[in-house]
Image: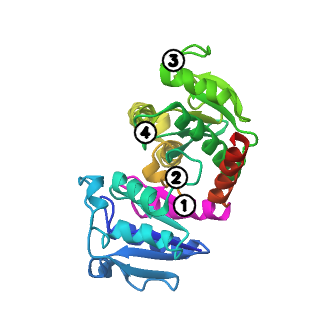
Amino acid sequence: MRIAIDAMGGDYAPEEVVGGAIKAAEVLDADITVVGDPDAMAPFIGQGHPRLEIEPARDVIEMGESPRKALRGREDSSVSRAVAMVADGRAQAVVSAGNSGAFMALSALRLGTIKGISRPAIAVTFPTPYGHQVILDAGANADCRPEFLRDFALMGSVYAEKTLGISPPRVGLMSIGEEKGKGNELTKAAYELLEDTDLNFLGNVEGTDLLSDTCDVIVCDGFVGNVILKACERAAQSLLAQIGKEVKRSWVLRLMPGPLRASLKRAVAGFDYSEAGGALLLGVNGVSIVCHGRSDADAICSAAEFAHRAVENQLVEHLASVFANLDEVEA
């Protein structure tokens, strides 16, 4: 297995990205290729690693550039060459902390979508006191049609079962009320489609069902999902800061700051995908991991580990099988 990593993407590239790639080469049973400007990466490669290789790419798509520019004559960009490695079969997964719009557009165009899937979706996994909860779409599709949400539910269910070991995953549709008739026109129409699937569909769920034991997969459009993602990330950070203030006020808590701080940071880290390793772009013909722009070396290594698990669990193959069977049924 080989994992391609866009070495020039992200706020701390190439230093932190290369550092994360070297860590991944040390801990994973996989070959790692860092894609980018060899001269820029050279100071951070050091002795490298026997399983670490360099794929030259001289161009860099900056964070603020339009994703459309990434598709026009930018084949020598680091992110384009990293995605091309998967498209050419030279790698089985690609990781990037760079321009997420460009990365997703390139993944969809170069890798193609799995037959039967209307649109790829970003799936994020949050820790809960009861296990894990998958939310999608987390930002790939701001405007959706009902069939998109049905496909998101199917993809999220396969992901939860094959990667997280949840069987059968309970699926909920994010709305403003539990009753079937609640919601906007999109959610009402999507509800009807979801009822006709073989999914373990529970019906509508609300914001209070986030991070609860109500369901395992929550489906929504990318606009709502991205708001949820950013709100949860900020809420976790704010909670950690508030607890820190309370610790300073208590002489008892000040006696054990190290263990307490470490425990709290571990709990909060799961809500920040810059630390959790990234989010999976489900629906494309390859494993594509979207990392936070501020990912450090540990986050890049975690993203590579995430990619490794997805490839080992044959997630793309399982998705292709599910949608192939769905096409046969509909035909």
Task: Find numbered disc 3 in the image and state the secondary structure of the residue it sits on.
Answer: loop
Q: Who comes first in sequence, dot 1 or dot 3?
A: 3
Tell me if I can see residue 191 in this picture.
yes
Query: Disc 1 versus disc 2: distance between alpha carbons?
Result: 7 Å
CA separation in Å, label 1 and label 3: 33 Å
Mark 2: amino acid: Leu
Name the mark on residue 233: 4
Q: Nearer the viewer, mark 2 or mark 3?
A: 3
Residue visible at 42% across and 41% down?
139
Image quarter of the C terminus: top right
**What are the residue bounds of the magenta stretch?**
287-313
Dot 4 or dot 2: first in sequence order is 4
Q: Residue at x 61, y 59 (%)?
A: 310
Structural crowding at the residue carrying mark 2, measured as other residues with C-alpha within 10 Å and reported as few (<14), some (14–19) or many (≥20): many
Quote the CA–CA distance across marks 4 and 1: 24 Å
Quadrant holding the N terminus: bottom right
* Residue that mark 1 sits on: 287
